[in-house]
Image (cartoon, rainbow, N blue to C red):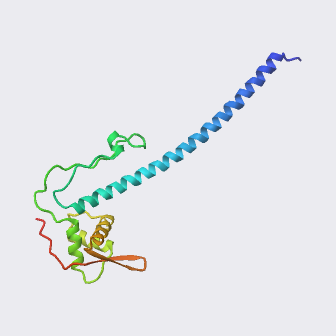
Amino acid sequence: MHVPEAAVQTDDLASQYLARVEQDLAHNAEAQEGIGRDMEALRQRLDALQRDRDVLLSLRQALSGPGTQETVAPAPAAASGETANGGQPAPVMPETHEAPTAPRTTLVDLVCSHLANQSEPRSATEVSTDIAQAHPDRRAKTTVVRATLEALVAQGRARRTKRGRSVFYSSSTPAQVPPSSG
């Protein structure tokens, strides 16, 4: 049986196209995997930056005292209304435009007072726990308390000592009783 030459050429051409399509599919799959890895890394970086921003905003609020809340520019993802992961709206920090009704003791004052009333240096975790127990209406994460303690050390209002890998803080000023918060 004789196969016409045109049919052989068509089969060769089809197999070449098929081979090229297979190569393109493999290249496409590799490119998608690479972009997927890049997107995941960027999502993780964005999440970390958003967590850092939340801590910094809490720290700024703790250090600035009562009645000095400022309008915070939204994060770029919040400004566009979308995040990199699925187009979901980004969480937006609530803005408060009302002045507090009663003067509130700042976290800085609470930390300074707490340290001044201690006979021994305390860790950031201990300070955070003690303040949370003494003031259940106040939310003070350990990371915010640690940052507040470090700011007080930088200002010379507290001292830092190390014991092995642990860091402890003590007051460098005499005790001051903060005003009552209500």
Is 66 or 21 nearer to us in this picture? 66
Furthest residue toward right = 1
Residue at point 13% right, 56% down? 100
Is 177 or 142 nearer to us in this picture? 177
Q: Is residue 96 left or right of residue 123?
A: left
Image location (x, y in percent) of residue 24: 65, 34
Quadrant position of the N terminus in the picture: top right
Image location (x, y in percent) of residue 115: 24, 76
- Depicted 37 relative to depicted 165: above or below: above
Image location (x, y in percent) of residue 54: 32, 55
Image location (x, y in percent) of residue 170: 28, 78
Is 135 or 169 nearer to us in this picture? 169
* Label tally: 0
Q: Is residue 104 left or right of residue 50?
A: left
Q: Name the quadrant containing residue 148.
A: bottom left
Residue at point 68% right, 33% down? 22
- Depicted 109 relative to depicted 17: above or below: below
- Depicted 70 relative to depicted 107: above or below: above
Residue at point 33% right, 65% down? 143
Q: Is residue 103 left or right of residue 90?
A: left
